[in-house]
Amino acid sequence: MSKTPEQIAREASAWWTTEIVDIQPGRIGIRGYPIEQLIGRLRFPEMIWLMLRGETPQREQADLLEAALVAAVDHGPHAPSIAISRMAVTCGLPINGAMASAINALDDIHGGAGEQCMELMQQVAAAVEGREPTLELVERVLDEYTAAHGKIVPGFGHRWHGTDPRAVRLLQLVRDAQARGVVDGRFATIGTLVEEALGRRKGTRIPMNIDGATAVIYLELGFPAGLGRGLFILSRSVGILAHAWEQKQQGGRIKGPMPPSVPYTYTGPQARDLR
Amino acid sequence: MSKTPEQIAREASAWWTTEIVDIQPGRIGIRGYPIEQLIGRLRFPEMIWLMLRGETPQREQADLLEAALVAAVDHGPHAPSIAISRMAVTCGLPINGAMASAINALDDIHGGAGEQCMELMQQVAAAVEGREPTLELVERVLDEYTAAHGKIVPGFGHRWHGTDPRAVRLLQLVRDAQARGVVDGRFATIGTLVEEALGRRKGTRIPMNIDGATAVIYLELGFPAGLGRGLFILSRSVGILAHAWEQKQQGGRIKGPMPPSVPYTYTGPQARDLR
Amino acid sequence: MSKTPEQIAREASAWWTTEIVDIQPGRIGIRGYPIEQLIGRLRFPEMIWLMLRGETPQREQADLLEAALVAAVDHGPHAPSIAISRMAVTCGLPINGAMASAINALDDIHGGAGEQCMELMQQVAAAVEGREPTLELVERVLDEYTAAHGKIVPGFGHRWHGTDPRAVRLLQLVRDAQARGVVDGRFATIGTLVEEALGRRKGTRIPMNIDGATAVIYLELGFPAGLGRGLFILSRSVGILAHAWEQKQQGGRIKGPMPPSVPYTYTGPQARDLR
Amino acid sequence: MSKTPEQIAREASAWWTTEIVDIQPGRIGIRGYPIEQLIGRLRFPEMIWLMLRGETPQREQADLLEAALVAAVDHGPHAPSIAISRMAVTCGLPINGAMASAINALDDIHGGAGEQCMELMQQVAAAVEGREPTLELVERVLDEYTAAHGKIVPGFGHRWHGTDPRAVRLLQLVRDAQARGVVDGRFATIGTLVEEALGRRKGTRIPMNIDGATAVIYLELGFPAGLGRGLFILSRSVGILAHAWEQKQQGGRIKGPMPPSVPYTYTGPQARDLR
C-alpha cells in the first residue's frame, strides 16, 4: 500500500483495458470507427461481427451469419430457458431479470452444444491436415471424442425432430455461399461426414440439428469455438424476450412449472416426529 | 386433487399457452411461418419484429429498427453491466453466466431509461389529442412527470457527452424516414420539444441521448413502451458478449472492481473486542 | 480528467466505502470485531444480525430470528424458484448458477410478500400513534392500502393451506417471547387484527401465512421492511440449494417444466407461407 | 403423443420427484417431520443439515458447521461478488436481483476453491487407504493434482493475508471437537500435511486459508465435496446482502467499478473512418 499517488492512478487506469470501445466526451469509437458512421450503415449482424472480431465482414459473410442468428431464436416452452423466462415474469421480475435468469440456463447442456460441435469439427479439421476429409478419419476423431466426452455427440440428433428443418435450410445456404466463393465448404463437408459416421454406428439416421448447422456456419466464417455459445445466446435472447413479453400480457402470478392440480411425487421418509 | 386424468391432462396442456411458436416433429412454425421459409430471407431485425409483434415489418421499418439496435451496443467498462460481465469471467463463469449477471443489471436505472422515455412521450402524445404538440403542452406534461417521478427526465442529458453523437445520427435517420413516408415524425417532434423545454428550465442545453433517440424510433415504429427495455437489452447484449470474450482472452482471476493496490475506505466502528 | 494523481487516488479509494468490513493483511474486522473472536462464539443468526445491523443481538432475540429463518426454507417444486433451481441444474449449471437463477425469481410477487406485509403493518403502527391498535383503525389502513396496492393483502391467505402451520407456530413463539419481555407483541397484535379485518371483509377466514408471521417477527425485532426480502432469501436459499443438489443426484438433461409427453397449447396463427 | 390421459397425468406427476418436502393442504413435511415441530427447536444450521442430508445432526456437529458458516460471510468490496452486489443496487435492482447477480459469480474460481480443496483432500484420504497419512503420500497426491489441475492448489495461500485468522481459529475448533470425539481429525491432519508439503515446495509458508479450513470441517462432518460450494454460498450470501443493503442506504446511480474520474485504458485501433 506504500505506492505513490502516481502509481495508484496509473494502476487504476490500467486495471480496465479494452480494444473495443473508446469513449471521450462527445465521441464514441467502436473498434476505431466513430459510432455515428456505423449507425444506419452497418447491419446488425455486421455490428455484431465488428464488435466480436475487430473488422467488418463482407456483405455475403454477414448474410450467412444473419441466417444462423435468425434460425435459433426459439424452440418453445418445453425448453427450460423459455420456461424460466415466463415463470420469472409471473414472479414479478422485469424483462431484464427474466432474460437474465433464462440466459443463465444456456450452459453446457442447454446452450453449449454448438460450441462443443465446433470443437469437434475443429478436431477433425486438425486431423485432416490439409487433405480431403474422409469417413475413416472422421470415425477415428469421433472415437477419440466420445472416449473423452461420452456418447452424446453435440450437434446431431434431436429428441423432437427426425429431420431438423433449420439445419437442412442452413446447410443449403452454406453450399450456395460456397458456390459463390464466400466460404470454402470445408466444415459443411466435415459435418456431413460426421452425420454419415453416426448413422452407420447407430444403424439409423442421426441428422445434423440446429447446433450442428450453426456450428458449420460459424466455423466457415472463422469464428472461434468459444464464441459459438455467445452467438447462440444473442439469437435465443429474441425468443426469451418474446416469451417474457407474451407472459406479461397473459398475466398470472407465481406460475409454477405445472398447474397446481398436477401433484408432484414425494418419495421421502414417511411422516415422523422429531424426537 | 380429485380431478379426473382427462382434466389433469387438459389442464397441464393449457398451463403453457403461446401464440409465438408451434413445434411438431419435423416442423417449427414461427407465428405460423415454417422456419425454413424465414431462414435466409428475413433479416435479423425483421425476425425480432416478427417474434415480438406477430407480423413482419416493411423493409424501411426494419432499417430504422436496425439502426437503433446498432447504436446501443456498448458504452465501455465504466458501465456497470459491462464491468460485471468482465468481472464474472474472471470468477470462472462461462459466457452465458457472465451475460446473465450483466443483463440482470439492466434494470430501471441502468436499462430502463428508454422505456421510461417512451412512457413520457406517450403521455405527451395522449395530451396532444391529435393536435400539433406545442412547447406549452410539453411543459405541462413534464411538470406532471417530474412531480410523479422526480427530477431526472429519462432520455435526456448524459454525464459524459455534451452532445450524444448517436442521438444526432438516429434523429437524422428518423427525419429521413419521415421524408419518405415510413414514419410520421410525431415522436421526433415531441422529443425535440422535450429537449427544448428542458433546456429552458435548466438554462443550458440538455440534449437528447441514446435512450431518448431510440425511444423516438421505437415509438415511431409502434412498439409498446414495455418492449423498449427488451430491445435495448438485445442491443447491449452484443457489447456484453464482446467484453466477456475480450476479458477471457486477457485472462485474470477474481478481478475486483479496482486493483488491489487501491484501498477502499472503511468507515465503521474502531477495532473492538467481543465482550 | 485534469485531476492530479493525488485526487484520482483519493477519489478511487472513496468510491468504495463501507462500515461493514475492514480488511488488512492478516486482519479481518467485522463491524469492528476481529473475525476470529466471532467464529465459534456467535451463532449464525447472530452473525447475520451483526452484519445487517452493526451490533450483536441478545440471545432470545437471536432465537426468534432463527425460528423465522428455519420456517421458510422450502415450499416444494411447485414454487417457481425451486423449479428453476432444478431445471437449471439439468441445463448444466453449477450450484452457484442454479441458486442465482432461482434467487433472482424471488422478486415482488414471489419473494416480496414479507417485505410488503412489513410495510402494511408499519402503516398501521404509524396510524396507531402510541395508542392501542383497534379493528376500526386497521380497517381504515387496509382501505388505504388496497386502494394504493390492489386487493391482494400480502402476508395473509394461501392458495394451498387453509391454516399455515408455520404461521401458527411462529405466532406462538412471538407470544412466548413477549411473555418473557423479549418483544412487546405490538406487531403480533396488529397482525391478528389484520387477519380479523380481512375475515370480516371476505366472510371467511383469511389466515396469516408464513410471510405474515415472519413479518411480525422481523418487525418485533426492529428490522426495517427493506430487509424482509433479504432475510427470506437467506432462508429460502437453503431449499433452493437442497433441491439443486437432489436434482444433480437424480440426473436428467434439459428438463423442461413438463414432461415431453405433455404438449403445450399453441394458439397463434394457422400455418401460412411467407409471401 | 398418443398417450392416454391416465398416462399423461402419471408422467406429469412423476416428472417432479423429491425426497425433501411433502406439501399437502395444512401440512408441510420436511424430510418427514412436520415443519411446526422444527420451528423453534432446530437451529438454523441444523435445518440446513436436515435439508441437505435427510437427518438432523448432533449438537456438536451443528456447532462446527455453524462456525464454518459464520467464518466466510464477507471479504470486502474487492471481492467481485460483493462489488457486483453493490453495483447492481445502483442499477435499480431489488435485493433479490443484486444477490442473484452476485451469487452467480461464485463459480469455479471465486466460489469453487472450497469444493476443489475437498476433492483434493478426498484424493489424499483415498490414497491413504486406512493407514496414517504421511508427508510423502501427500506429496505424491499433490503431484497428481497439479499435473491435472495446474499449479494453484485450492484452499492454501492468500493474496491478502499472510496467515488467515479465520483458518487458524477454525482449525483450533476442529481439534477441540476431535478431543471430544465429535470428529476424528483425519482431514485436519491431511490439511496440515498439505500445508507442510506446499511450504517445502515453495520455500515459504503457504498457509491454509478459509477455503481450506472450511473444507476440513465439511469433510470431517461427512459432507460430499459437491456441497462445499453450496455451503459457502449460504455463508457469503450474508455479506452479499449486507453490502447490497448498505449500498441502498448510501444511494448512488449507475455506479461503475471505478469513479468516472479514473479513465480506463483503450488499446484498440486509432480513430478511423468507415470506408
Image (cartoon, coloured by chain):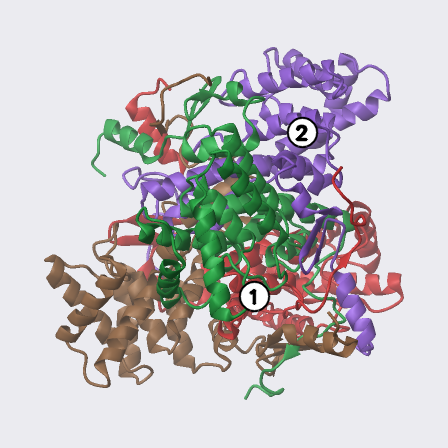
Chain colours: A red, B brown, C green, D purple
- The answer to whether residue A248 is seen in the rendering is yes
Residue D142: x and y, percent?
A: 72, 22
- Circle 2 packing at 10 Å, graded few (<14), some (14-19), many (20+), is many
The amino acid pointed to by label 2 is Ala
Q: Is residue D242 left or right of residue D20?
A: left
Identify which amino acid the numbered label 1 is placed on.
Answer: Arg
SS category of the residue bearing label 1: helix
Pointer 2 residue: D62
State which quadrant residue D33 falls in. Answer: top right
Q: Answer left or right for D242 relative to B136.
A: right
Which label belongs to residue A86? 1
Q: Chain of mark 1?
A: A
**In x, y percent, where is residue C11?**
28, 33
Q: Is residue A207 left or right of residue D265?
A: right
Above or below — where is B195 with respect to C20?
Answer: below
Q: Residue at x 10, y 58 (%)?
A: B203
CB within 8 Å, label 2 to label 1: no
D256 lies above or below A83: above
Element at badge 2?
helix
